[in-house]
Image (tube, rainbow, N blue to C red):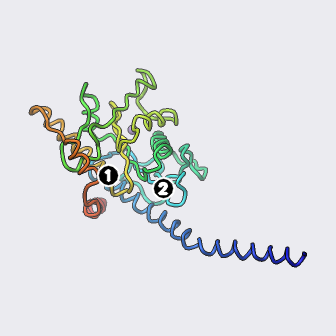
Amino acid sequence: MRMRRRHVFHFVVVVVGVLFAATAPARAAAAQSNAALVADLVTANHILFDQNVVDAFGHVSVRSATRPDHYLLSRNRAPGDVTAADILEFTLDSQPVTATNLPLYSERFIHGEIYRTRPDVMAIVHGHSYSVVALSAVQNARLRPLMHFAGFIGEAAPLFEIRNVAGDASDLMIRDGKLGAAVARSLGQSAMVVMRGHGSAITGTTLAQVVHRAVYAEVNARLQLDAMRAGPVTYLSPGEIRATASAPNYGRAWDFWKAQAEARRR
Ligand code: MN
C-alpha cells in the first residue's frame, strides 16, 4: 500500500513534469511574441503619427499574446515619441499590472472596455483625425464607406453621443470604465465607432490591419466630406462592403509606412 502510494506520487510528478516541459516552448513562444508585439506597437505609434492619424494625442494598443485579459499600451506620451521602454501592460479594468508612478493616458478605458466585450479584437486605435471629427459633427450624416479600402466601416459607422451618457456639459473625454463601457456598447459588433465632437475607436485583428483601417477611415472621411459638397454620394453597396470588408495587402502598406516613418524620425 505504501509502495503503491509512492508509485502514484512519482507518476504524478512525472506527468506534471512532462506537461510542464511540453508547454515550455509554447510559453517561450508566447513571451517572445509579446516582445515582438511591443516592437510592432512602437512601430504602429510612429506610423500613425507619420500618417497624420494621431498628433500629440491619441493612442494605439494591442492585446497581450500571453494573457488575453491584458493589453499593451504606452505610458502617457505623444505617439511619435513612444519607445519600447514606454510600453506598459494593463488589466481589462485599465489598471497597470505593475504599479507605476508614470502618468497614464486618461482615456485608456476605451481600450480595456472594448477588449472586455470583444474577444475577437486584438488591436485598437483611438485618435482625433480631423476629417472624422468634422464628419462626426455634421447633423444627420454618418461616416459611410465610398472607397474600396473602407468596407470595414460597414453600412455606416455607429456614432457615440456622449451626451446620452454624461449629459451636455462633459469635457467629452472617456475618463473611466463606465464611459469606456458606453463606447464599447456603441461600437457593438462593428469595426469602428465614431465619437461625436471627439474622434473614433477603430478595431482590428492585428496591428497592421488596425493601422491600415485607421489611415483609411480618415481618408474615407475626407473623401466623403469632399463628395458631399459636390453632389449626392454613391456609397458602397452591401455586396461591395462584404467583398471589401477584409481586404487588402496590409503587409505592403505596413512595410512602406514603417520605412517612411522611421526615416523621418531621424
Ligand atoms: Mn480622445
Question: Along the horizontal axis of the image, is 74 left or right of 252?
Answer: right
- Count the labels in the image: 2
Image location (x, y in percent) of residue 127: 35, 43
Q: Quadrant of residue 44?
A: bottom left
Q: Amino acid at mark 2?
A: Ile
Image location (x, y in percent) of residue 177: 52, 36
* Residue furthest out toward the top: 168
Q: Nearer the viewer, residue 42 or 235?
A: 235
**Where does label 1 land, which residue?**
48
In the rendered view, tell whether residue 115 sits above or below residue 36: above
**Where does label 2 land, which residue?**
87
In the rendered view, tell whether residue 21 sits above or below residue 198: below
* The residue carrying mark 2 has its beta carbon less than 8 Å from ligand 1: no
**Disc assigned to residue 225:** none
In the rendered view, tell whether residue 117 sits above or below residue 166: below
Image quadrant holding the C terminus, namely: bottom left
Q: Helix or strand or loop: what does disc 2 sit on?
A: strand
Q: Dot 1, crowdedness within 10 Å: few (<14), some or many (≥20)?
A: many
* Residue furthest out toward the right: 2
Q: Helix or strand or loop: what does disc 1 sit on?
A: helix
Q: Which label's residue is closer to the chain start, 2 or 1?
A: 1
Q: Amino acid at mark 1?
A: Leu
Question: Along the horizontal axis of the image, is 19 left or right of 7?
Answer: left
Q: Nearer the viewer, residue 149 or 43?
A: 149
* Residue furthest out toward the left: 230
Q: Nearer the viewer, residue 73 or 5?
A: 5
Residue located at (59% from left, 71% from top): 23
Image location (x, y in percent) of residue 79: 38, 51
